Image: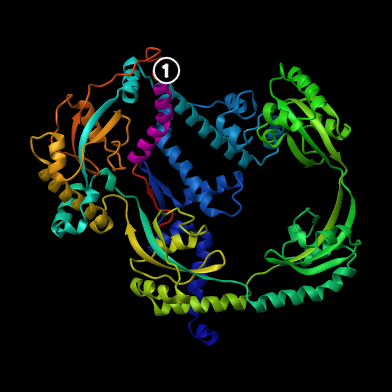
Amino acid sequence: MIEKIRRQSWLLLTMVGIGLLSFLVPYDAVMSMFGGGNNTIGEIDGHSISAQEWQKALQDREPLFQYQGNQTNLSNDTWNQLTENFIYNDEYEAAGLQVTNEEYDEILFGEVLSPYVLQTIYGGQDSASFKEQVRKSFDSMDPSEAANWKKLITQKRMKEKYDAMLKKGVYANKIDAKWAFKEMSDKVSIDYVVKTFAEIPDSTITWSESDIRAYYNKHKNDREYKQETSRTVEFINFPVKASVNDSTTILQALTAMKEDFLKATNDSSFATTNSGVPSAAYTNYIEGSIPEFEAQIKSDSVGRVIGPVLVGNAYKLIKISKRGLDNQVEARHILRKDKATGKAMLDSLKTVIAKNKNFEEMAKQYSEDPGSGANGGGLGKFGRGAMVKPFEEACFNGAVGSLQIVESDFGWHLIEVLGKNFPYTKVAEVQKVLEPSAATVKSAYAMAKEFTINYADTASFRNAADTLNGGTRVTVAKNIKPNATSVSGLPEASELVSWAYSAELGEVSQPMMAQNQYVIAALTEIREKGVPTLENVYDKMKEEVIKEKKAEKLVEEMKGNEALQDLATRIGTTVKKGENITFRSGSIPGSGVSVAENVIIGACLGLKTGTVSLPIVGKGGVYVIQRSADIVPGTSADNYLSDQDRTLKNWQQRAASGVFNSFREAANIEDNRFDRR
């Protein structure tokens, strides 16, 4: 290879030049020079998003949240925020919406926090001391990070204002309220005859491919058939598990280390250096975590090393490093948030609890702390700094068993101290997770690779799976979206999704590692956004064609100007009754049809009493109905005021999401983030 490079030094110089060029010239420009790459990440409402703009958006958002390397979540959150911004920015400008510096300060640190700030930054907890901590955090923040927070919070505040305006612009009048009331309260009863589509076997219906194609041409643009971009795959798993040799190797390594662990003078340092899980190398022993050896851990002398022992999926060497008493307390409390009335109530509760010793019962009934109230007020054990100062001082200074009432930013607390200075055992752990070695992983890959070589098409893939290891289950993952991070049966599936969007229909993948297993997939369906292909909806449209043929047959069979009983006798069924049917009824009582029969329900309320209808085609069958009595109207007890209020609230709740969905649909969004072609 070296000799070849020497003979063709021009090639080396060319590659080095390209490498240097990539550092000096923006990536997009380099890709354009060579005619490759897609410089457009996507388009939202006419705004084209370049690769540079996208990278900047990702870099701005990532430090604000704890993504911990989860690039898929970062990408999705960033895209969703860009979508919201591009959709609404013109709307904000047209409405004259803005957020001043004074308002920004108020919604972030003031008396009235914005809903987004309250949930995202404060975690739903609002207190003066917490606000002060947040202010100090923002004051010490890197200027660029603080600017990105301000940009995001401002954008969210504009959306909150816009949504509030939408809600205020919605109104339900008395006529709306009356119709809402009538939909729920006007009732009618019918007699009817029904023949369901399920009663006719599909095998008795004659249809042709031209029937399905005609149905497709007529209905392909219907909303119910509109499709989004998706892929469907079938996959099998080759588990990668630690072998007996892997287990023996780990056990021997820890056994050889035991003597050095006994002699170690710094247990924490030794364990941290040698453990496969350094974060758990030196901790207080948690009672019940290793029940088989708990008695030993609690009673053996300091310096003793236990193991190696298998705990869960890891071998451990456990050294008893230290015993002592910790500076912790255990307490429970009852919280009343109203500072004007809270103390008086807690004084009364204190008297009752002192007499009846029923703190837990009173906490469940009266505490306004959602976290501990249902648990009888229990807060568990905690050290200094975990609670607000007045609460902490009462717990650490109060006697065990004492009942104290103190005030904090959260309200008034009735506190009982349950214990102090608990004994603890500090243990050092050298832990080696039982996992497959490189040789085991390589062997599993070889098996999976051989499978892909021998069975490289969908049909042989399925057949081979049926015989592999006595029968391997094939998992079907349908309608996988481009930004999916998991699929059915596979929580971590980013690589599988990436492959599915670069593969061709019918292609079988190479082995992909996911969650300690190799996955082999076959791409069985490709759907692109818009009008579906006939192949994509063939089965569903075939079902509808057969249903139409059945409906035609039943309508012809049920025609005739005759009484319901005569009709029922002629076609071999019975007359049924449907009682108390309203516009809100989902189906016809007793029909045996579970799908919504809106056309039939409308006919029930629109037909004249005593009139026998013609055959009516529903979703689940064909009906002939006769209204047995006039509509029984409901009577409003408050002149429809409660219905007006309920209708208004319902419309207001739907206003913001409805407008957003409409804007998004009209924006013609093109998401190319996951386009691997």
Check the image and report above or below for 589 versus 204.
Answer: above
User: What is the chief secondary structure element of the magenta stretch?
Assistant: helix
Q: The C terminus appears in which quarter of the rendering? A: bottom left
Q: Is residue 393 visible?
A: yes
Residue annotated with mark 1: 642
Q: Is residue 176 left or right of residue 467?
A: left
Question: Could you say where residue 144 lies in the image, as x and y percent from the top left?
Answer: 61, 41
Crowd tier of the residue under label 1, counting other residues whose Cα lies within 10 Å: few below 14, some 14–19, many 20 or above: some
Question: Could you say where residue 458 lies in the image, as x and y percent from the top left?
Answer: 35, 71
Residue that appears at 24% across and 42% down = 619
Residue that appears at 79% across and 27% down = 356
Question: Quadrant location of residue 111?
Answer: top right
Check the image and report above or below for 152 versus 526.
Answer: above
Residue that appears at 48% across and 41% down = 81
Q: Is residue 326 left or right of residue 98?
A: right
Q: Which is more toward the observer, 457 or 51?
A: 457
Question: Quadrant location of residue 113?
Answer: top right
Q: Is residue 533 visible?
A: no
Q: Is residue 649 magenta?
A: yes
Q: Which is more toward the observer, 587 or 123?
A: 587
Question: Could you say where residue 533 lies in the image, as x and y percent from the top left?
Answer: 25, 56
Q: What residue type is disc 1 on? A: Ser
Check the image and report above or below for 492 versus 409.
Answer: below
Q: Residue furthest left?
A: 561
Q: What range of the chain is rendered magenta?
A: 646-666
User: How many marks on residues?
Assistant: 1
Q: Secondary structure at mark 1?
A: helix
Q: Is residue 352 left or right of residue 675?
A: right
Residue that appears at 56% across and 49% down = 59
Q: Which is more toward the observer, 401 or 647?
A: 401
Q: Is residue 50 left or right of residue 616?
A: right
